[in-house]
Image (cartoon, rainbow, N blue to C red):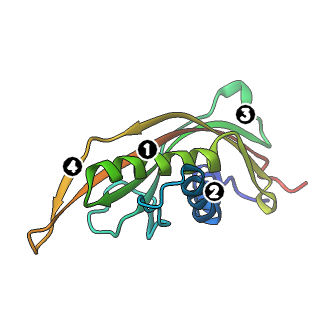
Amino acid sequence: MIPAQLVEISRDLVLDQIKANIASSLALVRTNRNDPQVTTEPPKSYFIFDGAHTYQCPAVFAVVDSMDVPEPQTGANFVNALLRLFVSVVIEDREADKLTIKAERYQAALFDILHWRRLEDLPNNLKIWVRVVRCSFSPLYTKERGDDLGEFRKEVSLELEIKHWENPTNF
């Protein structure tokens, strides 16, 4: 018997989807906008918790918020659940206007990668359906460095609704 995978495997599928597609999606958005002044480099680090204090930007965070398991939708040999997961990216730039555009481009790239996607892990008899339900942008804030130079930072966050279905038993 395969044990239930639940939130960990769903989060990992979402992160794998981002890692596999973010560079090409950012390049496509940048090409489409036809503005080479604003950079859109791929993320340098990934985290599954929201308390990281030292990291290089851009940094992606994928944090599970909750999982709802409606009683009538779960049986003895399957799980049908609804997860809420937040995917955010923290970026920085020396110019506030370029940073704002960069945040919008990351949001567009992540939306394209994640919205209405079906992801699966066949060895674990698991399928998820991902939908972006909300996007939020933080205000700009300044991060001062030791050399007295400051950079602006901004975070864009996508709230995902994940329909999680798994059959933890062998077929």
Q: Secondary structure at mark 4?
A: strand
Give the mark toward the camera: 3 or 1: 1
Residue 141's mark? 4
Residue 9 vs residue 94, the one in the foreground: 94
Residue under the image location 58 percent in, 39 percent down: 83
Q: Earlier in the sequence, mark 4 or mark 2?
A: 2
Residue under the image location 63 percent in, 46 percent down: 112
Q: Could you tell me how far apart the alpha carbons at marks 2 and 1 are, in whole angstroms?
A: 21 Å
Q: Could you tell me how far apart the alpha carbons at marks 4 and 1 are, in whole angstroms?
A: 16 Å
Q: Could you tell me how far apart the alpha carbons at marks 3 and 2 are, in whole angstroms?
A: 18 Å
Q: Which residue is mark 1?
A: 157
Give the mark toward the camera: 3 or 2: 2
Q: Could you tell me how far apart the alpha carbons at marks 4 and 2 are, in whole angstroms?
A: 34 Å
Please state which amino acid type lies under the numbered disc 2. Ile
User: Looking at the image, which residue sits at the far bottom?
Assistant: 147
User: Looking at the image, which residue sits at the far right?
Assistant: 171
Do the numbered discs 4 and 2 sit on residues whose CB atoms are within 8 Å? no
Q: Could you tell whether 119 is left or right of 16 in the image?
A: right
Q: Secondary structure at mark 2?
A: helix
Please state which amino acid type lies under the numbered disc 1. Ser
Q: Earlier in the sequence, mark 3 or mark 2?
A: 2
Give the mark toward the camera: 4 or 1: 4
Q: Position of residue 54 (x, y in %)?
A: 27, 68
Please state which amino acid type lies under the numbered disc 3. Thr
Residue 9 vs residue 30, the one in the foreground: 30
Q: Could you tell whether 122 is left or right of 25 in the image?
A: right
Q: Position of residue 55 (x, y in %)?
A: 32, 69
